[in-house]
Structures are given as structure tokens and as C-alpha cells.
Image (cartoon, grey):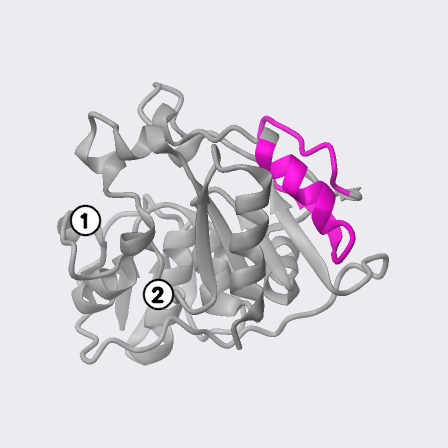
Amino acid sequence: MLTIKGNSGIGDSVYVRVICEHIPEITEVMSDYPEVFEGLPVNVIPHKSNKPANFMRVSYCGDKYRTDTTQWQDIARKAGLQPVPPLTSKWDTKEILSTARPPFCVVIKPYIPMQRNDGFGDDLEIDIENIDEAIKELKNKYYIIQCGKGYKNYNNAEIDYSDKLSLKEYINLLAVADLVISQPGNALPILEAFGRGKGVFVFTKKGERSSSRFIKAINYNKIVEKKDRITWCYDSDSPNIILEKISGIMEKG
């Protein structure tokens, strides 16, 4: 029996799920998100449970400032996976939105980064005005669905599932979406591991200039594993530039 513990977020649990699929000796996971591990033969206990004797701790934080790896590569190597396997997981997706007209785009409401209320992640908070204008144009091609628990609303979403989805429903939605637009966060590993569609993740120039080395390390090259399916933009980019980025990634096979 082997117990594994990752970092505390939803996205961190997604990384741990993929590791579990490659290490059959893992029978127990320390996570506050048991829904993420649905379908796996593992017992899920609270993240802050006492550490058992046979224990594996995995995190990308120790290699956060390496520029020659991604965070998925860092955490997989911590688990002893060599070569590093693809960031892909088996997930039984179910279409939950009978009202959605495919193709559809999911936009995640902006939220406080890392769930911090002490101002630490302020440089990562995005402005949504230009993104919202781009979404207005996307409505000609996609059905726009807003979800998440953020503090700002996109005016041009056609349906709003904010605070209305269970975690499983949220994962299912991202897994079947044709396009996902979000700031960096749990939507990224969910889309990479479970999803079929493409993604555009929104960064800030404030983050690039941050006085925090930790914040500056949250960048496209480090956090994105599947760069063939995921692109990025700044929140300050014009709506036309954002649309060009989306068009470019959607045209890729």
C-alpha cells in the first residue's frame, strides 16, 4: 500500500490522478477532491490527514524556477516516472448541457489566484474588457458558456453556470468543450489531461514584471504541457489580437 500526496489544489489533484494511473502500487491519495479520482482503485482521504508510513510526496515547487522543464515534467519526475508520460488520463465524460449548441466555448470567470486573500497573487489578476469584446465576436462561431466561482462576469456569455456545477460537472464540461478561455489555474491541467478541445490562457504583463520570483515563474512555457493545443494572450491585448490567437490554435490539427 502506497499513499501519495500532491499540492492542495484541484489542478494538483489532476496531476496526481495521472501519476496514479502509472503507479499501480498507489492505493491511497491525500486530496480534498475525491471526484477527481473517480474510476480509479484508490481510497481518497483529506489532504491534511496524518502522513502514513508508506508515503510519497510529489510537488513541482522544488523545480519551479527551472526553465528547461514544465511543471508536469517536474511533478512526474518527483514520482519517479521516467520517461515522463503524457499528461493524459482516462475520464468517462458525459455531456451535461443539453442546451449547448456545439461547437461551444467555456469561459472561466476571473478569480483570486491561488485562493489567496493577502494580495500575494494580485499581479496575476486579469482585466476582462478586451477578452469580453473578443467573446462577443466568438458568438458567431461558438455557443458561449460561463462558469466558475470568480468575482467578475463576462457580459457576452450566453449561458451562466457560475456556482451551479459540481466539480464532476465542471470537469465534464471542460473535457468536452471545443474551446476554453481562462486565466492560469485548474482549468489548464483539466483541459490537458481530460479534454479534447483547445485552450487560450490569459496572462498579465504585471505578472511578468512582478517583484515575486514565484509569480514570474507562472508563465506559459513553464505551466503549459500541451503547447500544440494551448495558446496564450495578455489581458491587455486588443480583441483582434486575442481573436487571431484563438484562430491560430483552432486551425491546428
Residue 104: tell me if it is visible. yes
| Residue shown at 34% from the left, 28% from the top | 206
Residue 232 location (% of width, % of height): 44, 50
Q: Is residue 158 left or right of residue 12?
A: right
Q: Secondary structure at mark 2?
A: strand
Residue 24 location (% of width, % of height): 32, 80
Residue 83 location (% of width, % of height): 20, 80
| Residue shown at 66% from the left, 30% from the top | 153
**Is 131 within the magenta?**
yes
Q: Is residue 94 left or right of residue 240?
A: right
N-terminal of the pair, mark 1 or mark 2, is 2
Instruction: Assess disc 1: are there few (<14), some (14-19) or many (≥20) residues with their C-alpha within 10 Å of its C-alpha.
Output: some
Task: Give the residue type at disc 2.
Answer: Glu
Marks 1/2: CA–CA distance? 26 Å
Task: Give the residue type at disc 1.
Answer: Lys
Residue at which label 1 appears: 64
| Residue shown at 49% from the left, 37% from the top | 237
Which segment did they paint magenta?
A: 130-157
Residue at which label 2 appears: 28
| Residue shown at 23% from the left, 43% from the top | 217
Residue 41 location (% of width, % of height): 45, 75
Q: Secondary structure at mark 1?
A: loop
